[in-house]
């Protein structure tokens, strides 16, 4: 079930990451020792979720069953771990599948922890984070290629920072289904698959070549399997070369079919999706002019762990994303800071009676306050709606899709009529928490309507389950009739949030 992560007064000793991919599910558990990650457990199962994605974007019963059984096994290992110490993410297949209210709820129950569905470019960021931490420190610019079951991520980065990232709609499962579904491996279907890969890379090819890189690194099961095959055959001494890819292509065509495919270094479980994965990588090699690629054993799941460590240490990429987005939109940062400060002060007054004590709730309020005027970059008219749309649909590094929906709902509801239906549509228990958080933001915005630097008086707030009483110093409201009039109107607006506002 989706919820806000708990605040760790003491950092957890164990953390875990689960990657719910289109081909396989991976889990790693690590111990945090002196600020470093020590992997202590790994689990992997070939679930082939992508193979169960139907044309109507629903998952077959068989695919759902395989996934739930796997998640139950993972859940047994993670059951004792506290909320917030586990990050589980779904990638391409779950991005496409219609899972609301059905499979995703069952999956979270089986795992015992929330599952986030992340966007393709966020997946690319996390892949790069994992791969870069597994490489020796270097000044070289890197190209990282990660081939999953349904998507392929291309990232160029310096050090630990990605500078260009894309997620392409092709992977070992989807390509194998489309071009090798009958089990045959012919020159014709291999060429068609390779050209499909080239076409998918084509929109980003020139941009990536112009940026350039010194070394290329591959990650994921597909690329590791190709490395194992070409090195076992003696076609490459280090990593994967273009020449070894050409030799592997000849061997695939010579086999003629999956049944006839016998390559040392290739496991039986990888074999059904190997031709499609090979075609993806061969197309990437040709499109980007790659001659040699080293291979990393780190990938998305390791990136998840490093990202989680950043959150635990209060070095959260999401805060930096908010700052960058605010800068791009040219927002009034001084005004936003005033609203943020007042909102956080009000939150302290109401957090216990309204059950808003988790630290990430304060973070979400802070980010919403800093971005509440985002829509002004489009138009002043109904700018809260424009802002909500931008925040829900933009690429915000570190944010999951549900987190962006919450952030967008807060911005959408910060002024004018209270959009009760938008909050009701959020998953439990976020609907109620976000609704009350929005009331706090609305009041903070209201108190700074004049947009000047004058200090507010000491304002106290007393909250009940369905009530909020705002207390001002004696005589202050009478001296500020515009604020009093706005509070009277605000009391009418937030009735639809089932909260009765009093003030005096």
Image (cartoon, helix red, strand yellow):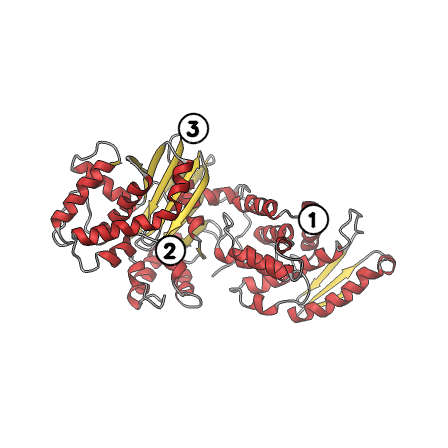
* Marks 3 and 1, the one that precedes in the sequence: 3
The answer to whether residue 49 shows anywhere in this view is no
| Residue 339 coordinates in the image, percent (x, y) | 70, 51
Circle 1 sits in a helix, a strand or a loop, which is it? helix
Image quadrant assignment for residue 498? bottom right
Point 79% across, 52% down: residue? 458
Q: Give the label on residue 341, or none.
A: 1
Point 80% across, 48% down: residue? 454
Residue 144 versus residue 401 in the image, above or below: above
* Marks 2 and 3, the one that precedes in the sequence: 2
Q: Residues within 10 Å of mark 1 (few under 14, many from 20)?
A: some
* Marks 1 and 2, the one that precedes in the sequence: 2
Circle 3 sits in a helix, a strand or a loop, which is it? loop
Image quadrant assignment for residue 489? bottom right
Q: Residues within 10 Å of mark 3 (few under 14, many from 20)?
A: few
For disc 3, the marked residue is 139
Residue 131 versus residue 203 in the image, above or below: above
Spatial CA distance of label 2 from label 3 is: 32 Å
Point 42% across, 51% down: residue? 120
For disc 2, the marked residue is 92
The answer to whether residue 108 shows anywhere in this view is yes
Q: Is residue 283 left or right of residue 437?
A: left
Point 57% across, 44% down: residue? 324
Give the number of the mark in front: 1 or 2: 2
């Amino acid at each position: 079930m989706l919820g806000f992560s708990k605040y760790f007064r003491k950092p957890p000793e164990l953390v875990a990451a689960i990657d719910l991919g289109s081909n396989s599910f991976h889990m790693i558990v690590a111990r945090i020792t002196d600020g470093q990650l020590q992997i202590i457990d790994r689990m992997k199962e070939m679930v082939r979720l992508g193979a169960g994605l139907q044309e109507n974007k629903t998952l077959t019963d068989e695919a759902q069953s395989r996934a739930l059984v796997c998640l139950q096994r993972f859940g047994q290992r993670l059951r004792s771990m506290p909320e917030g110490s586990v990050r589980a993410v779904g990638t391409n297949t779950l991005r496409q599948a219609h899972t609301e209210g059905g499979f995703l709820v069952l999956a979270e129950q089986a795992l015992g922890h929330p599952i986030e569905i992340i966007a393709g470019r966020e997946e690319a960021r996390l892949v790069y984070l994992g791969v870069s931490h597994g490489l020796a420190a270097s000044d070289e610019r890197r190209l990282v290629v990660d081939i999953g079951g349904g998507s392929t991520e291309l990232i160029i980065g310096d050090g630990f920072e990605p500078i260009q990232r894309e997620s392409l709609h092709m992977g070992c499962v989807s390509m194998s289904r489309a071009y090798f579904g009958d089990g045959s491996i012919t020159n014709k279907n291999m060429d068609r698959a390779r050209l499909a890969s080239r076409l998918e890379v084509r929109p980003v090819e020139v941009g990536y070549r112009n940026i350039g890189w010194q070394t290329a690194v591959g990650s994921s099961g597909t690329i590791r399997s190709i490395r194992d095959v070409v090195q076992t055959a003696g076609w490459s001494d280090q990593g994967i070369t273009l020449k070894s890819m050409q030799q592997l292509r000849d061997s695939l065509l010579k086999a003629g079919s999956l049944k006839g495919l016998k390559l040392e270094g290739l496991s039986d479980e990888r074999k059904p999706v190997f031709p499609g994965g090979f075609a993806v990588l061969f197309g990437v090699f040709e499109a980007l002019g790659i001659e040699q690629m080293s291979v990393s054993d780190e990938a998305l799941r390791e990136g998840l762990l490093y990202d989680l460590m950043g959150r635990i240490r209060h070095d959260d990429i999401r805060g930096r994303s908010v700052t960058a987005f605010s800068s791009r939109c040219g927002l009034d940062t001084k005004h936003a800071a005033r609203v943020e400060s007042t909102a956080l002060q009000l939150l302290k007054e109401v957090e216990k009676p309204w059950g808003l004590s988790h630290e990430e709730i304060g973070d979400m309020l802070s980010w919403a306050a800093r971005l509440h005027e985002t829509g002004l970059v489009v138009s002043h008219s109904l700018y809260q709606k424009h802002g909500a749309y931008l925040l829900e649909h933009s690429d915000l590094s570190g944010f999951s899709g549900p987190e962006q929906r919450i952030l967008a709902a807060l911005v959408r509801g910060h002024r004018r009529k209270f959009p009760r239906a938008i909050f009701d549509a959020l998953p439990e228990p976020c609907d109620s928490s976000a609704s009350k958080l929005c009331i706090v933001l609305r009041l903070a915005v209201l108190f700074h309507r004049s947009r000047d630097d004058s200090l507010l008086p000491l304002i106290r707030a007393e909250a009940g389950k369905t009530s909020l009483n705002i207390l001002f110093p004696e005589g202050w409201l009478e001296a500020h009739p515009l604020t009093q009039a706005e509070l009277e109107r605000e009391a009418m607006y937030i009735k639809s949030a089932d909260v009765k506002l009093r003030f005096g």
